[in-house]
Amino acid sequence: METAHPAERISGAAAAGSRHALMSVRGLGIRFKTAQGIWQATRKIDFDIAPGERVGIVGESGCGKTITGLSILRLLPNNLSGLDGSIMFDGVDLASCSTRTMRGIRGRRIAMIFQEPMSALDPVFTVGHQIAETLRVHTNVSKDEARAQTIDMLRRVGIASPERRIDEYPHQLSGGMRQRVMIAAALICGPQLLIADEPTTALDVTVQAQILDLLRNLSETSKTALMLITHDLGVVAETCTRMITMYAGEVIEDATVDAALVRPLHPYTSGLLRSLPHLSPRLGRLPSIPGRVPSIAEMPDGCRFRARCPHAIAGCEAEQELLDAGEGRKVRCWRFRELDLPGALQHAASAPIAGRVVRQ
Amino acid sequence: MPMAGDSKAEPIVSVRDLEVGFQTMDRRATVKAVDGVSFDVRRGETFGIIGESGSGKTTIGRALVFLLKPTAGTILHNGVDPQALPRKQFQSHRRDYQIIFQDPNAALNPRMTIISSVLEPLELAGAGTKAERLARAQDAMERVGLPQELGERYPHQLSGGQKQRVIIARALTLRPKLIVCDEVVAALDMSIRGDVLNLFAELQRDLGLTYVFITHDLSVVSHISDRIAVMYLGRFVELGPTESVSGRPLHPYTQALLSAEPLPLPSTMRSDRRIILQGEMPSPIDPPSGCRFRTRCQYAQSVCAEQTPAWRELEPDHWVACHFADRPNFSPS
């Protein structure tokens, strides 16, 4: 089965990535050994992150977004059976480089923060010790210099009286403060890329706003690229400039946040937007996506969203490639040209937030 | 049929000056998780309670169905104080007032089949014959859209959305009048969250249920509720019809909460007028004097530390506890 626009297929040879990318992921796939055999968790993941760019990776639980973030730093579980493809980061392939090279990059040039700061911080060491440790492992600074830089970093992440806080233990800090400490530890070596996996999911909405604001500002001032992994489209819209949507282990859409929200090209992205209560008339019936994500053990051939897609027709059972949709957009749906899918604007017009947004 | 949420009719739940306290682990201090809250839940309405973690919203929910004993104040069900009833009567009374929690995995016994979980409350209540109980359980499953054959399966064989439906079916078997829903969709993925919220709306229409919907998610609470109460550090700061509270919030905390919510909108439609609150909620062990929000409030004056703001009805049916909520130019809009 030929796709509608075969010329626009991204061929394997042309997938070398943009020359200006800080990181180029091509054909990334992860397989795990389980009692039921080998499971393919993700496959054919392609995307680029430019220096200083803020990219959101969105999808529902089990879509492979977290494992994609972890694979960049090769922090994968022991039952990994194979890593396919390449992750080019500044001339080094992170998927195949030596453990030694990886150790020099991890924490220094690429840092990561997680959802639950309490489980990422060691309860028996002061926060200052844990932040300075990263610095002392990767650079030759003296103890005093490390302490001075740590205090400065704590101040930059918005912790009041850092001279005092530096000697406190994680349990003495609130959830929002702990996440600030994690961000300080991640940024202390001035990494080029920060991977943040659901950094605000465990936080309250007013604290979430503070942390998102901080991440956006730090990324802008220090030119650190941000890869923000989240299930929350609102968080992506507030923080990122580009949005990569994943479904069932594949990238299905890659576009600027504004383009993806205004005119999504993939039926799944459009369906997700439609199912958000923000964008539906109050007390009305919420549209939802029927069915559920196919299980990893029984992935269908062809389009993996097919069984839940209102636009599925004969032809969708063919293997779907990530097609170039122009203007830097990509979509894994061969019908994208003929479908005119509703985005956030159509929904928002009749939604409860209508009174709270500014129209230009 | 009476109108949903008729304010004249007798409320299904009436709460006055409710206090629920807990002793700290070292028994040296008492934490008032709920500290002086009064409200009515009207028959047939969905009453939303929104608040951040530690605000006391879950404690209120549990107290409403007497899973927790109030330290002070009264809770009347249909004008009756259930705690004054004899034990036997209290037990049959509480069948009418059910609660559903966030995590369906924790609420289902992994070693029981789905149908036996749904049957259990009926068996405990000793309602009808065995055949009648089974028919009622199967009816409840059908009502929440679960196929009959799922009854023979175990919880691990079901998806998150299906498990939450099982919990709803189980709560329905005893034909309750009111269900307290505590973060019932928080654990569900967004594409199926809508399905479960639609189910709640459908059941309310068909069975005349009343809901108390507790959540931290503003978009969920404003979608489903008729009225919303906003809670901060053990007290209500605002209560009113959903349109007024989400459209014209009167309390600075509600205003901040609304503006902090990340909206899935393109940049051209997003407002820059965000209020980013400083700091976090203070500890309920030692709450601030006067207005509890004053430590984070941009409008706070000295009076806010000295006097607890009165609970005032500034607009019809729209209540607020703030010294300055009625001043012009107070609201940022």
Image: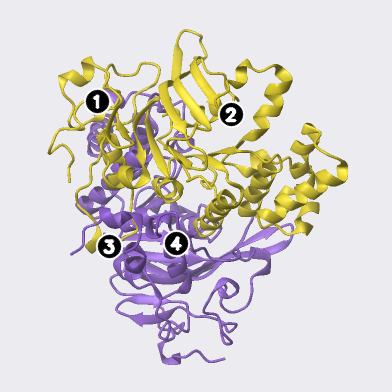
Name the quarter where the N terminus of chain A is drawn.
bottom right
Q: CA distance from mark 4 to mark 1?
A: 50 Å
Q: Amino acid at mark 1?
A: Arg
Q: Which residue is mark 1?
A: B294
Q: Is residue B286 visible?
A: yes
* Residues flagged by tags 3 and 4 on a common chain: yes
Q: Colour of chain A?
A: purple
Label 2, residues with CA under 10 Å away: few <14, some 14-19, many ≥20: many
At 31% from the left and 27% from the top, the residue drawn is A166
Secondary structure at numbered mark 3: loop
Label 4, residues with CA under 10 Å away: few <14, some 14-19, many ≥20: many
Q: Say which of B191 and A157 sits in front.
A: B191
Q: Which residue is mark 3?
A: A51
Q: Which residue is mark 4?
A: A94
Q: CA distance from mark 2 to mark 4?
A: 55 Å
Q: Colour of chain B?
A: yellow
Secondary structure at numbered mark 1: helix
